[in-house]
Image: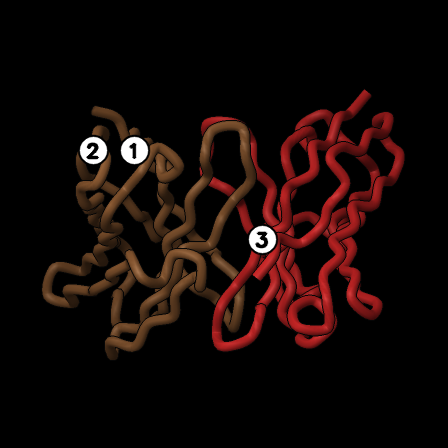
Chain colours: A brown, B red
Amino acid sequence: QVQLQASGPGLVKPSETLSLTCTVSGAFISSHYWSWIRQPAGKGLEWIGRIYTRGSTNYNPSLKSRITMSVDTSKNQLSLGLSSVTAADTAVYYCARGLGNTAFDYWGQGILVTVSS
Amino acid sequence: QSALTQPRSVSGSPGQSVTISCTGTSSDVGGYKYVSWYQHHPGKAPKLMIYEVSNRPSGVPDRFSGSKSGNTASLTISGLQADDEAEYYCCSHAGSDTSVFGGGTSLTVL
């Protein structure tokens, strides 16, 4: 059973960096690509970006300048960094496993991150 | 990269069929065979229902089907059940190995 669990601070101050980790169990992280997706309250899903375990990444153009993604195959974890956050970055953040070209077959439960001073 | 356009809401009675549309451009929906659909119940993780336009993952009932014509993809749910009431999102490849979601459609089972 593939499971993803996102973790990290639930509260981040404006202008600081949001840092999240997603721990994968039941699957080898090296066998797939992985994505981060978010959902602001009352709004739809927004694709943040994806990372292949060989290190290549693709990011949402609107967020590209602020995103950093990485993987740690030894820990079966992926990480997301989003710098210079504002209240607009307040959202539930999901990590998900990639399937085919553009599909996500396993999702974590999501973690609410609030940007506030 | 603009969000794909979905109707805000659709509704149907139990047993009926509903279709949710997802309209993009030739740079996303119209340009690739990579459209997926997700069912999202509040407080839960989204669930993949359709991938690559019309493929169903294992475990998804065949009441759910997907199609595409030009720049518009569609999700059809037949034999509506109460548990189908949820938010539905489409997602498409958008070039340069990026993805874009639709704004979401709220399905109400009357």
With respect to residue A91, does B101 lie above or below? below
Identify which residue is drawn at 69% across, 65% down: B53
Residue, disc 2: A12
Give residue A98's quadrant in the image.
bottom left
Give residue B10's quadrant in the image.
top right
Question: Of B70 and A109, which appears nearest the observer?
Answer: B70
For the residues marked 2 and 3, what is the alpha-carbon distance in whole angstroms?
26 Å
Residue A40: x and y in percent read 45, 35
Residue A113, labelled with which disc?
1
Side of A6 where A88 appears, left or right: right
> Callout 1: 10 Å neighbours few (<14), some, many (20+)?
many
Subunit ID for the residue under disc 3: B
Subunit ID for the residue under disc 2: A
* First-in-chain label (1 vs 2): 2
Residue B106: x and y in percent read 69, 32
Residue B101, labelled with which disc?
3
Subunit ID for the residue under disc 1: A
Dots 1 and 2: beta carbons under 8 Å? yes
Question: Farthest left residue?
Answer: A74
For the residues marked 1 and 2, what is the alpha-carbon distance in whole angstroms?
7 Å
Q: Name the mark nearer the viewer: 1 or 2.
A: 2
